[in-house]
Image (spheres, grey):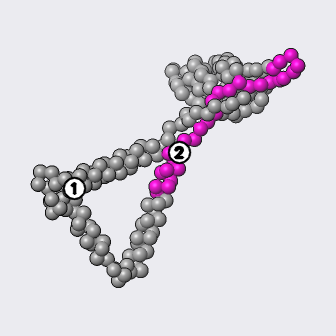
Amino acid sequence: MIRQRVNLRRRTGALLTRSLAIALALALVYGGVLDVLLALKLHGLGANEINRISGYRTAYHWLAGLDRADFTTHRSLIVGFGGLVVFLAFSATALRTLPRPYLTRTEIGLATSERGATIVRPRAVERIAEVAAQGNAHVIGVTGRLGDGELHVDIGIDTAPAAAVTLADVRARVRDQLTRHDLEPMPVNVTLTGYEP
């Protein structure tokens, strides 16, 4: 059976990466426009006018004028460590934006025989968890979600002082029902998502 994957979590570095990509794109567009103006000399814009706007000749002459004496040990260390910091920062940002796939909900196989196989659909497992959670008197709303090898149960309660006890009780009830239905043990994560006194 082919197991599909989907990315359900938001990438934390996506905004930063997008901003850097936009900044680089704008810089490339700006340089391209200046190159076109320099090549076509539109509206009387010559090399001097383009250099006054962008400073490309000034930067080129400054870089071309550097010699070995300008690269002292102190400056070399500053440039080296600065480049290393920038490299590590961009590498960390790139790694955080990589997609991290998680398995979609799949059927759970219980037993296979000559007559066929016993299959439990994800919604059935989620319903077992929801019914088990509703057995607690303080639970006023519950939603189950079967994830990548774990079961998430979101509950709403009607009393704040009993929140910790209720969460522990719901988790115990759900795990007990999974065992009673001969389902394989899996982590059960109970999250408090609502409170209505």
Residue 139 in which image quadrant:
top right
Residue at horizontal 26%, vertical 67%? 59
- Residue tagged by mark 1? 39
Q: Which residues are magenta?
A: 89-117
Give the residue type at disc 1.
Ala
Q: Which residue is more in the foreground, 165 or 79? A: 79
Say whether residue 24 is left or right of residue 101. left
User: Residue 114 location, x and y as percent?
Assistant: 88, 19
Residue at horizontal 43%, vertical 74%? 77
What SS does tag 2 mark? loop
Residue 188 in which image quadrant:
top right
Q: Is residue 96 above or below residue 122?
A: below
Residue at horizontal 56%, vertical 23%? 156
Say whether residue 13 is left or right of residue 109. left
Give the foreground label among 1 and 2.
1
**Does residue 104 appear in the picture of this structure?**
yes
Q: Upstream in the sequence, badge 1 or badge 2?
A: 1
Q: Residue furthest front?
A: 40
Q: Is residue 159 above or below residue 56?
A: above
As measured in the structure, the alpha-carbon distance from the residue carrying label 1 to the one carrying label 2 is 40 Å
Question: Residue 144, which numbered label?
Answer: none
- Residue tagged by mark 2? 98
Give the residue type at disc 2.
Leu
Say whether residue 84 is left or right of residue 119. left
Residue 102 in which image quadrant:
top right
Callout 2: few (<14), some (14-19), or many (20+) C-alpha neighbours within 10 Å?
few
